[in-house]
Amino acid sequence: MGKIEFERFELKNGLTVIVHEDATTPLACLNIMYDVGSRDEDPDRTGFAHLFEHLMFGGSANIPSYDAPLQVAGGSNNAFTSTDITNYYITLPAQNLETAFWLESDRMLNLAFTPKSLEVQRNVVIEEFRQRYLNQPYGDAWLLMRPMAYTAHPYRWATIGKEEKHIEEATMDEVKAFFHKHYRPRNAVMVVAGNVTTENVRQLAEKWFEPIEKGEKPQRKLPIEPKQNEPRRTVAERNVPLDAVYMSFHMCGKGDKDFPVWDLISDVLSAGQSSRMTQRLVKEKQLFTSIHAFVMGERDPSLFTVAGHLSQNVTVEQAEQAIWQELELLKKELVEETEFEKIKNQAEANHEFSEMNLLNRAIGLAYHQLLGDANDINKEIEKYMAVTREDMMRVAQNGLVSSNCSTLIYKRKN
Amino acid sequence: MLDRTKEPKFGTIDSIELIEPTVQHLSNGLPVFSINAGVQDVLKVELIFGAGTATADKLLVGSSTVELMKEGTEKRSAAAIAEAVDFYGAYLQNEVSFENSSLSLFTLNKHLSNTLPTLAEVYHAPAFSEEELSIYRMNNQQEMLVKMEKVSYLCSKGFSSALFGSDHPFGRSAVPSDYEKISREDLVRFHQSFIHNRLKYIMVAGKLGNDSIALLDEYFGEAKRESDVIWNVNVPEHETKKIHIEKADAVQNAIRIGRVLFSRTHPDYIGMQILATVLGGYFGSRLMSNIREDKGYTYGVGAGLVSLNDTGYLSISTEVGSDVCAAAVREIYFEIERLRKDLIPHTELDLVKNYMLGSLLKTIDGPFQIAAKWKNYLKHGLGMDAHHDLIHRIKTITPERLRELAQKYLQPNDLIQVTAGRKMQ
């Protein structure tokens, strides 16, 4: 198992820089992860972190167009926002690395906020809201599940936001305040990976990023989600062709020692064609046309979810009962030895496949650094290998119980 | 003092190194192309067949055959096959297009001798049991109903039909009840004639062990090799078509605009590919700048060329707010007209050229990506010359030439327009 080698240093303004050298590629990646996501939003201004991500492409203090100079240097870029982070990345020919430093440092320095850019991006984000969440069957599942499963923690809204209205109402002052609070060097991790040298990256980082004012590290005081004590349920009547069931259970956050246990539980249930739910519920009993169990890897205590589309003529009661039967089995019997070996082999292989990609490695390093230590990326697989069958039974017994479950049912409108 | 208004010096890409595959032959003459690259101990073994969805007379037979191959063999049940692959953390993946299909094994190197036999078994002796077919039929029928709720799906299907004609092998489209019509015999026959006997070659990518070829010979060295299916793709002439597919409850409409063009081997293909990039092939493209970044009508819009074996087509696609659909369509034609009237400024064209070369560099980073690139070249009988030629043409194309191409191939009357969603105002 290959170890991801890296160097790490901090600039005077508190920006953490990580360098991962890989001479086998002609490319370089520059990845900046800001420690801000939708969990940091005001409940009356949801969708803001993501809207802000769009505004980051509207030109910065000294550079009117972000994209054009990058494309001219043969590069491309994108970004994504989650509940926890906002991540920006550039990939370009390694020889043109400095262009990436120039662009990224200028937009960390200051944005050139224009009313036009805000207006247009509000519209673009509303169209994204429609395309991905409203105009798709089951697209609003997380808009319904999150506010049911959470009562206090900001994970109760989705990253896209609670509603279009919050995005429509965003003002220029709010945008500026958000930038100055969250987009400071101390609130970011930069990873430079690919055909680069640490020495060169250090020089470029000092040249372009070190002059940026330090700023404060924003303090975060998020409400703690109280323990759920009774089953919750929402039935949504929608124009969908098949009924569907989503069941979410509270679980630990990404940094917790039980995280790999939950992840492996989801693998036993639905990783690969031979998994329990695919074999028994889709193929043998034919209750579902598809069914999946998954974790999200959020930093704060998160959700473990089982979601399936029901076969025609199967009732919601039958479907739920079948899912519960599978969950109960995890609590009653230890996972079989060979099955256990299988999911460990799968974890090992998935790890190896995902590390083929340079950008994945860069993002992984940045995320682990935000969680505490970039080097934990190299310990991740060991943590999976250390999980025991007893751990899986214990976690299932404590977590996969009805008083910890929020159920969302999609009913077909007639 | 650092001058942040001045961009750092950058270089243009002069050459792009593409690793050439090694070619070896198995006992039956079957070529094996190998890309030995990468640092992870993984392998992708891909069996490439010269048949796809358009090869079968009956709808859905091509895709169903390829997809059902891994659902059980003469020796082992679907569950046992799945177990045999999953146990080693490996997976099987199939791809099906109009004229080609493939079956791939992704595996850790150290498990190759355990996982390859399963790939071979799935290739040689799939069972196509009635029971598996019936599960497949039911699930796919129902998942198709889900897809039919998406305007993008309705629009793409309508677009293929409009491009090639709804009876043409590339234009016909299935409805859920078509799954009822496929029988076990259809699959067995298609597998025998077009998959099993028409394995064209094997592509292996990753960190190759010394024994890989010997192992492949053991399992594939006796496969029968019949000559390629001969294609006669007559694309019917058609009048200008504007089609709307109604979906009354949509909040966004999907738009596809394009036309039939030609395949990768046509002398104008690369020129048109560059033109499509200018129009809608990257984030700063004219369509993105206009309908997303200026007007906020959409989350995204794209344009690109698709190459089939002997033909190809241009496709411009987007999803926009239903209320601005008509306006978005107008802007798309406006941008096409601009390409026909005005020369593309040199600064913009230089940007596109550099961007395309940078993208090319990115698409051949890593063994699986290099293999995919070669698969595409091999499909058209092309080799390393094509790679050099592509770079040369990107670097040397002129605004004048691109305007000529736009005038020749982007006449509004030749374009087909399909929309899906709410009725347009």
Image (cartoon, coloured by chain):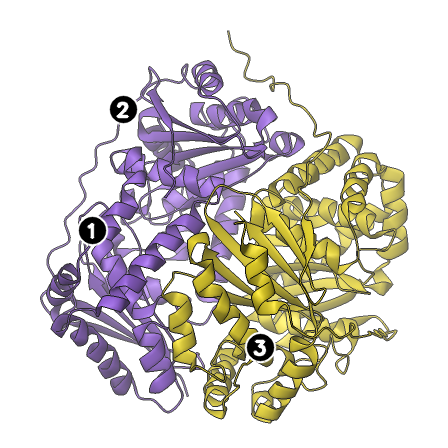
In the rendered structure, which disc, 2 or 1, sits on the residue that comes first in sequence? 2
Instruction: Examine the image and state in which quarter residue A52 appears.
Output: top left
Q: Which residue is disc 2 drawn over?
A: A216
Shade representing chain A: purple
Q: Which residue is disc 3 drawn over?
A: B124
Distance CA(mark 1)–CA(mark 3): 39 Å
Label 1: how many residues lie within 10 Å, few (<14), some (14-19) or many (20+)? Answer: few
| x and y, in percent, of residue B348 in the image | 74, 34
Instruction: Label 1: state its secondary structure.
Output: loop
- Where does the C terminus of chain A fall, quadrant-wise? bottom left
Instruction: Examine the image and state in which quarter residue B168 appears.
Output: bottom right
Task: Examine the rendered structure and indicate whether residue A102 appears above or below residue B221.
Answer: above
Q: Which residue is disc 1 drawn over?
A: A386
Is residue B302 shown left or right of residue A224?
A: right
Most foreground residue, B202 or A288: B202
| x and y, in percent, of residue B349 in the image | 76, 36
